[in-house]
Image: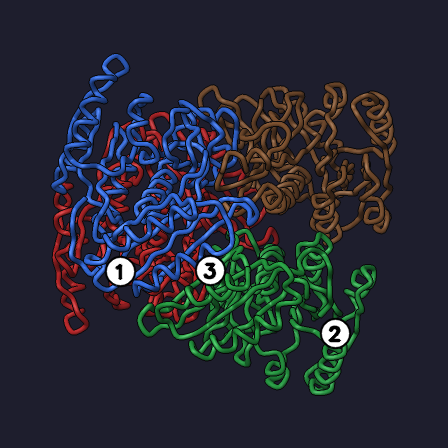
Chain colours: A green, B red, C blue, D brown
Amino acid sequence: MGNLSNGLENRARLLVKCPDKPGIVSVLSSFLHSHNANIIESSQFSTDPVNGTFFIRIEYHCDYLQEKAADMELEFKGIAKNYQMDYHFYYLNIRQRSAIFVSKETHCLLELLWEWQNGDLDTDIALVISNHETASPMVEALGIPFFYIPANKDIRKQVEEEQIRLMEKYKVDVLILARYMQILTPDFVNHFKNRIINIHHSFLPAFIGAGPYERAFARGVKLIGATSHYVTNDLDEGPIIEQDVERVDHRDNAAQLKKIGAKIERRVLVKAVKWHLENRIIVEGNKTIVFH
Amino acid sequence: MGNLSNGLENRARLLVKCPDKPGIVSVLSSFLHSHNANIIESSQFSTDPVNGTFFIRIEYHCDYLQEKAADMELEFKGIAKNYQMDYHFYYLNIRQRSAIFVSKETHCLLELLWEWQNGDLDTDIALVISNHETASPMVEALGIPFFYIPANKDIRKQVEEEQIRLMEKYKVDVLILARYMQILTPDFVNHFKNRIINIHHSFLPAFIGAGPYERAFARGVKLIGATSHYVTNDLDEGPIIEQDVERVDHRDNAAQLKKIGAKIERRVLVKAVKWHLENRIIVEGNKTIVFH
Amino acid sequence: MGNLSNGLENRARLLVKCPDKPGIVSVLSSFLHSHNANIIESSQFSTDPVNGTFFIRIEYHCDYLQEKAADMELEFKGIAKNYQMDYHFYYLNIRQRSAIFVSKETHCLLELLWEWQNGDLDTDIALVISNHETASPMVEALGIPFFYIPANKDIRKQVEEEQIRLMEKYKVDVLILARYMQILTPDFVNHFKNRIINIHHSFLPAFIGAGPYERAFARGVKLIGATSHYVTNDLDEGPIIEQDVERVDHRDNAAQLKKIGAKIERRVLVKAVKWHLENRIIVEGNKTIVFH
Amino acid sequence: MGNLSNGLENRARLLVKCPDKPGIVSVLSSFLHSHNANIIESSQFSTDPVNGTFFIRIEYHCDYLQEKAADMELEFKGIAKNYQMDYHFYYLNIRQRSAIFVSKETHCLLELLWEWQNGDLDTDIALVISNHETASPMVEALGIPFFYIPANKDIRKQVEEEQIRLMEKYKVDVLILARYMQILTPDFVNHFKNRIINIHHSFLPAFIGAGPYERAFARGVKLIGATSHYVTNDLDEGPIIEQDVERVDHRDNAAQLKKIGAKIERRVLVKAVKWHLENRIIVEGNKTIVFH
């Protein structure tokens, strides 16, 4: 992760998951207040107030946070133990580093680059890897390292080893599959659990698998969609982050559905990535909690 | 069908399906013009200008239509033969008669009755049949015959015989399944081919079958939907007429999804029924062409 | 307000508005925790962490709440004073009582009654007042008192006196204007500050005033909308609660826009009323904060 | 306009506007059929079948169209005279040439360039003119001539003369204002009547004029929108082509509304431009008929 000095050095986010019981908000807010931290934004959710699971995302401001963070985290360990908390502190001056994988179709990549150039995607794009050379000029024009790694199912193992090597070298936190059309092995996926974001070109769970637009056309649906989800080892079955749809009609053939779908994919993937970077998403089982 | 005298006696619609080739629009419009009919609205679609199938829906006005209709239809037979046309004339002074089947949940029925009372559903509601008594008061308050016919899978045959008998007695043209939760036999379905409209409580083809809201909740989708379709003998596989969705999030449990879904079902079913009554829908294979 | 005993007697909501500064969440959650209250849901917003205004809505569960409420409120006074809080405790076993005003068009009224019958509108509908008799049967069929009070601009004063007398007699908390087409005087509006919810038949601030659908038609807009807002003395300028739109096209004349608009009005008004009843809305200046 | 030889040389569109009366479709389709033209797509609209105005857009295929077009147009003159038709033939092998004007914000320009690179915008982008240098690299990278013409209200006349000179030199058919923030004089506008497409950053007629996002924020609206329209001499009052909206809430400040709005602007402008290029739009008074 890279260090910035843009006024965010006193901002952080605390995400917590624990068994629900009375007093959690109180103990968290008292903890923060005792360190003179001011809560800027807070969202919570409980699956059930009785014996359920509690989730909270707190964004706070704290003067001299850089100096105080280590002590705060140390003190928090005790609280976390008492309440059986899974938790994570995120510091806003440390930007997440992302890798983007792409194949021949570049519309999702372009949308990501665009948002990033606008300053609306809070990440360092560390590198782009593709099994095609199509995206090379637009990536390199922005000074982002581009790696062309041809791939097919026979050389999957070597390809993934090279990909992992590069991602470690570039210290990647999150991997975005911007229409990368190769299957990932369980080993690879486990390496980046809940950190690989994919865009599927259908309104899941409809049209799982290949050729969703062709199948949507064959079925005669009146809306088509796209789904962004974390990648798990069950193809197209990972936790859904965001979905959206557009209206189509009998005049739209499969090629036109694909064009319409590309627009949905662009905006759905960008939203999912943005929420991930803002630490708005908690994965719970096969679902996501997204704190908007 | 009932006869009205409300200024619609000079209006008709002609729907045609035939192999596409040059000159079809010309021959149809010349035919109408030669009878002094004025085209009010016309929509067409071709699957492919070369060797495709051509579809057209024409609404026209013609003075003295009642007197001229028989001659026009007779003359049209020749044209239809030349061009291998499937076709149908619909006269707007003859309202289609509909039956509504409903079970315990009445939200779709209520929406239909509401639109009908507003004059926005161009049909005579001939009767309502239910396997529950819930809907009886609201139906009878409007002077519509209501028949309570308990149903379950063991007596399906007798139930359907009684239903068919009633529908024939009441001269029903179209059957609307407004959340009728009994399976229909192939015999029954064949009796009313392309004339049974169902509302399915999911965004087909996702969540085919029972419990769609529970399964949508389990899958963690971010949008839920409803689908109106013609009933065929493949459960939930019939030609889709209309679909719509609403956004949901992690806070919505299965019961809340059901409530949100009910609102989608209401509006989707009403649209599909309206388009059917306005002869806007042509079924082609397992799809629909809907001329908006 | 009516008393119920349906398991809600241990639930309450606390809404607070105060100058933003560190420690507010901490003090509120510690206060609740010290009374063994468990926070079920919490949403907050700050116009600006530095010198801004802070808003929070907390829903909590507390055993023996009925017995403890008075003491809790008393103790809370001290906190509120320290932090300059505007605040209100709402107890969920006390349902708000509502009045509905309606004129000739009943679609919004019907939607409200429907939601209410479904148990989705947490209010006692105390009475319905109309300057037309149209709605009388549907209201009285549900056992709700209906008052026909003819109105026009010459007798406005007497009419409003009678309306206020009835609303006081029936202990009304919130007034819903479900397409009530009479102007209210400043005196009347002041009587129910931030407690009158109106549905305006346009996408405000477009088409303020009369005849919005006619004017939308004349302008050739491609979307029409509806807006629900609190009533103030500036016509159609009150704080907006909710808005929605539907697509229209050149084929829709003013009458059709009106029909499409009626559907938008129905759903927008119901949402606004529901949020008001759930204490989700805070009015701040001429805007609303809506905690979804 | 440029000549292509990509299989479109036998395709054309005929747009007609005339007083409605019986027989128009018949005469048009017979005319086309007599020349062995096959109608591919046809859409029509009448403001009123009695004494109204009739509009039709026909796309047709005709072998040897290049050789026959002149004769067909000549023959058509007689028909047009009989029926008092305004009409235009568009040949699909002749692409319209467009100019894009842009100021500092390039999001709409980028979206246009993107669609154009994808082959989804059927136009030759002849040149881009800007009063800022920001857009220069992205335009020139695509080989499109870019002209930097500083502008302000004192030199408006000279600036417009230079713009018109360039547009004539480059034979421009349609001018797209992709967030060009200078006012155009009536002379300039009249020069390109119904051929200048603008994107306004609000849901017209709300927030006419400057600072729409700031004003939307101040008013507390719950949806913001964008409007694409033809430019007339009444600021923001020209015929609306397309509009769309997005949901916002109390947490969105004016800067965020602007970001959300930018996404709406992009897609709304592209749709309007596409429809214009496909000859789908007929301007009638201050409204548009858009044949989708």
User: Is the residue under label 3 in contact with that under label 2 (CB below 8 Å)?
Assistant: no
Q: Is residue A246 above or below residue A277?
A: above
Three-letter amino acid code at the position of disc 1: His
Name the residue beneath numbered marker 1: B191
Single out the mark in the foreground, 1 or 3: 3
Label 2 residue SS: loop
**Distance between mark 1 and mark 3 Cα atoms:** 55 Å
Q: Is residue A106 above or below residue B9?
A: below
Three-letter amino acid code at the position of disc 3: Ser
Three-letter amino acid code at the position of disc 2: Asn
Name the residue beneath numbered marker 2: A131
Which quadrant does the N terminus of chain A fall into?
bottom right
> In front: B71, or A126?
A126
User: Which picture quadrant has residue A140?
Assistant: bottom right
- Identify the residue at the far top of this view: C154
**Distance between mark 1 and mark 2 Cα atoms:** 55 Å
Q: Which mark is residue A43?
A: 3
> In front: C4, or D267?
C4
Residue A263 image point, x, y percent:
61, 55
Sequence order check: which comes first, mark 2 or mark 3? Answer: 3
